[in-house]
Amino acid sequence: MAAFSTSMTHCPSSSSSSSAAAFASNSCAINRIHQQIALSSIRLTRKLCLRKPSRAVHVQDGASTMKVSPAKNDGPAKILKDGMLSVPPVILPEESIDIASLDLNKESSTVSITVVGASGDLAKKKIFPALFALYYEGCLPKHFTIFGYARSKMSDAELRTMVSKTLTCRIDQRENCGEKMDQFLERCFYHPGQYDSQENFLELDKKLKEHEDGRVANRLFYLSIPPNIFIDAVKCASTSASSANGWTRVIVEKPFGRDSESSAALTRSLKQYLDEDQIFRIDHYLGKELVENLSVLRFSNLIFEPLWSRQYIRSVQFIFAEDFGTEGRGGYFDNYGIIRDIMQNHLLQMLALFAMETPVSLDAEDIRNEKVKVLRSMRPLRLEDVVTGQYKSHTRGGVKYPAYTDDKTVPNDSLTPTFAAAALFIDNARWDGVPFLMKAGKALHDRRAEIRVQFRHVPGNLYNKNIGTDLDLATNELVIRVQPDEAIYLKINNKVPGLGMRLDRSNLNLLYAARYTKEIPDAYERLLLDAMEGERRLFIRSDELDAAWSLFTPVLKDLEEKKVVPEYYPYGSRGPVGSHYLAARYKVRWGDVGSEQES
C-alpha cells in the first residue's frame, strides 16, 4: 500500500528589519497561533471517552506525519514602537502527530467500518453492540458508516433486523435510547460477497465511496472470520477496498496460528499486503477494565511498587474458569485446545503486563517493548510443569451433564485438553525463582478470571501461636478479579474485637459495583475505539506474538507427539487433582480454593 508523508512549511525568520519582512513575519506568527488554537480546540472538544492519539504513529494511505520541535513561548503579543504587531513564534509540542486522527476539518473526513463475517456470532453478540455503545456515548465521529460483509445473502433491512436483536440500551438507561438505536441502524448497510473475491470487494469499495461522498476516507476492517481465510480477505481488502486518501487498518481476531511456525507464516502473509502499523491483533482481555488498571494500580500507588518483586512475592496466579463446556464450539475447540485458546494469549498477556518493568512512557511502543522483554526472559514450558485435563460426564442434582467427547463435532478418542495448569518462570533480577502459575478450564464449578498475588510469610511472626500450624492462612494476598463482579481486594490479618487475642483474615475491598455507579464498558468498545484512533497500546505486536509462541510451542508439540492422555475430571468440579500437586511442588497452593467465602 502506498503511504506518503508531507512536511510542514516553516515561516521565515522575523529577524528582518524591513517593514515588509516584519509584516510577513508577524503574519506567519499569527498563522502559527491560529494553527495551535485549532489543534487545542480539537483536543478540548473531544469527548472524555476519546484519548489522545498515540505518538510516533506511522500514517498510511495519504495521511500526513509531521514532527516539530519545542520552543519556549515568550509571552503574549506586543506592540512595537513602529506600530507593528509582534507575536512570538508558537511551536507545537514535540511529538509525531497523526493528521488523520486529529481530523483538523471534521467535515472533510469520515470513518467506514466494515465487519467481515457480519453474520457470525462474534459480530452479532460483540462487535455491533460495541459499535452501538460507542455511538450512544458520542465516541464515533460525526461522519461514519458501518458495513456488514459476509457470504450470506442479506439485504440492508435484514442486517438491521439481525443487529437490532442484540442491541441494548444498557448505558445509563437514557430516555432517547430508542431514537439513538434507530439512528445507528440507519448507518448500517450490508454487502454480500466471497472472502476471496476481488470483484466482490471492488463492489464494496464502490458502495463505501458513495457513502464517503468525497471526504477523506478512513477505513477499518474487522476480520470476524476463521483464520484459514484471513489472508484471502486481507489480500482482497488491501488491493480492492483500501482508502485512497486516508488510513486503512485491519483488526485480526485470534487465534494467530497454532504454533511458532504457523504464526510466523501468518505474519509473513499479512505483511505482504499490510504494514505492521496497519495490523491490529486483538486480544479482548487486554481491553477489560481490571486488566487495563494493572499498570495504574502498580505504578501510581507507592505502597505496591516496592513490594512488586521476588523479595516479597511468593507466587503469582492467573486463573481462568468457565462453568460451561464447549457447547456449540466443539469442532473449533478440538483443533486448538485450552492452552492455545486461553493460556497462550489471554493469561500470558496479563502476565506480561503484571511483570513488566516501568516503561519509559505510556506510549504504545514503550509499553509493548517492556512486555516483549518479559516474554523473552521466560523459560520455555517443560512438559513436567504442565497438567492437562478433560471433563467427563457427571450427574448432579438429577441433571446429567455431557462429557467433552459427547459433542458430535468432537472425535470420540480426542485427547484435546479442556483444562490445563502450568508453572512458568521469569529469569530476571526482579522475578528470579517466583512461580507464575496459570490455570484455565471449562466445565468447572464456577466462572471467574482473576490474578492472585500471594506474599511471603512474615519472618519471625509474633502471632504464629495465634495462627496455628497453617501459615498459608496468615499470608497476605492481593486479588484482582477481572470478571465477574470486578474487584480489587487485599487480604490482611486483623484482631477480632474482644478481650482475648484471636486473629481473623479480613479483606480490604474495592468492589467496582459499589464504588462506581457507571457501568463498565465492554472490552470490545475500548479496543474498537483505540483502533479507530490509531492507539496500539492494547494490541499485540508481531515480535510479541513470536515471543509468546516460543514459550508454548515446545510443550504443545510434546503433548501431541507423545499423545499425553489428559486427567479426566467431572463436569462442574474443581478440575484435575494433578493441578494441586503441581502447585505443591513449588510449595504454594491455589488461592481460589475455598474462595467462596471471600468478599
Image: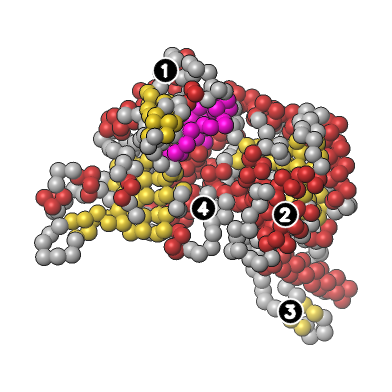
Q: Any mark on residue 380, and which?
A: none
> Is 83 part of what is drawn in magenta?
no
Q: Residues within 10 Å of mark 3 (few under 14, many from 20)?
A: some
> Is 342 part of what is drawn in magenta?
yes
Circle nearer the N terminus (2, 1)? 2
Q: Which residue is mark 4?
A: 289
Q: Residue at x 60, y 58 (%)?
A: 170
Is disc 2 placed on a helix, strand or loop?
A: helix
Task: Kindly tell me whether residue 419 is visible in this rendering.
Answer: no
Is disc 3 placed on a helix, strand or loop?
A: loop
Q: Amino acid at mark 2?
A: Ser
Q: Are marks 4 and 3 in contact (CB under 8 Å)?
A: no
Q: Amino acid at mark 1?
A: Val
Q: Which residue is mark 1?
A: 564
Circle nearer the N terminus (1, 3)? 3
Q: Which residue is mark 2?
A: 101
Q: Which is more foreground, mark 2 or mark 4? A: 4
Q: CA distance from mark 4 to mark 3?
A: 46 Å
Count of labels in the image = 4
